[in-house]
Amino acid sequence: MASVSIPICAKLSSSPHFKPTNSSPFPRYKPQIVTPRRTLRQAVSTTQSPIIDVPNADLISSLKLKLLAAVSGLNRGLAATADDLQIADSAAKDLESAAGPIDLSIDLDKLQGRWKLIYSSAFSSRTPGGSPLRPPTERLIPLTIGRVFQRIDVLSKDFDNIVEIEIGAPWPLQPIELIESLSHKFEVIGSSVIRIKLEKTTLKTVNGNLSQLPPLELPRFPEWLRQSSSSNGSDEFEVTYMDSDTRITRGDRGELKVFVNWLKL
C-alpha cells in the first residue's frame, strides 16, 4: 500500500497543542499610517492666529508729509492752479489707499478737538462747481477771510464751523475783527460718513469796544458761506483718513478738505 506523506507544517497546525509564534521567517505585514508633511503643516496653520495686514507706519508717515507739502502755500486752496488741485488729490488718494478705510465706530474719539482747515479744493475757482471763499459784497466792503476751524465735541455731538473775518475801515479807524460760528449737531452714518445739521449762526466781535457785545445770532448763515449744504441746513461728508493730528474729508460733490488738529478740547 502506497504511503501518503503529510507536510510537517500541516501536521503541526492540525495539532491541538500548536500555537503560532513570531519566529516565522515571513512575519505578517502591518501597514503604518503616515501623515503627509503637507497635512501636518495645514493642521498647525489652522491653530495659528490669522495674519492681519497692518498698514506700514513709515509709508503712511511719508505719504502724509507728501500731502501736507502738496497743499502748503496754496492759501487753503484759494491760490491753487489746476495742476495743484490734481497733485493734492493724487497725494490724498495715495494716503487714503495706504491707510485703509475709516471706521468711526472705533475711531470716533479721534474727531475730538479743534481742527484747522489748511486746504479745500472747493475754494479754488478752477474746481467744477467750486467758488472762492469770498462774499459778493467784497467790492463794497473790504473783507478778509482769516483762519477756518472745525470744533468737534464727540460727547455732546456739537460740530461748529468757525470763520475769522476782518472788515476793513478807513484810517484812522481800526478794522473790525469778527468770528462767525455755524453751530451744528452731527451724527455718524455708516462707518465713515458724518451728517451735520445747522442749528444757528452767530457773529461775535473780538476787538475794540464792540467786543463787549454778546454774540449776535443771525436768522440764517450767509449764502456765500454755503458750499454743499442743502436747503434744510444739513450736509454730509466722508472721513477718508484720520489720525491724531491729520484728517481728510470728501464732500458729496467731491470737494477735498485737509485739516490739522489745532487744539485738543
Image (cartoon, rainbow, N blue to C red):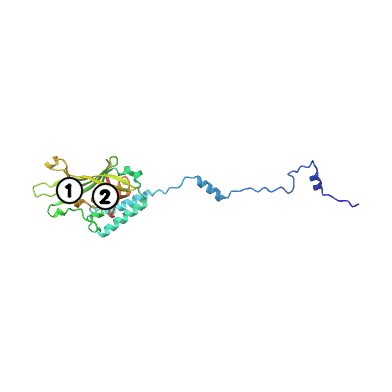
- At label 1, the amino acid type is Ile
- Frontmost of labels 1 and 2 is 2
- At mark 1, the secondary structure is strand
**Residue at the left extreme, as displayed:** 172
Q: Is residue 127 left or right of residue 52?
A: left
Q: Position of residue 23 (x, y in %)?
A: 74, 45
Q: Which residue is mark 1?
A: 165
Q: Which residue is mark 2?
A: 235
Q: Position of residue 88 (x, y in %)?
A: 29, 55
Quick one: label 1 or label 2, which is nearer the N terminus?
A: 1
Q: Quadrant of the C terminus?
A: top left
Residue sitting at 55 percent across and 48 percent down? 40
Instruction: Return the residue nearer the eye: 191 or 242.
Output: 191
Instruction: Return the residue nearer the eye: 194 or 175.
Output: 194
- At mark 2, the secondary structure is strand
Q: Is residue 16 left or right of residue 254?
A: right
Q: Position of residue 66 (x, y in %)?
A: 31, 53
Q: Position of residue 145 (x, y in %)?
A: 18, 50
Q: Which dot marks residue 47?
A: none
The mark tally for this picture is 2
Q: Is residue 43 left or right of residue 117?
A: right
- At label 2, the amino acid type is Asp
Query: Circles 1 and 2: CB distance less than 8 Å?
Result: no
Residue sitting at 29 percent across and 57 percent down? 87
Residues packed near mark 1 inside 10 Å, few (<14), some (14 to 19) or many (20 plus): some
**Residue at the front extreme, as displayed:** 232
User: In whole angstroms, how far apart are the C-alphas of marks 1 and 2?
Assistant: 23 Å
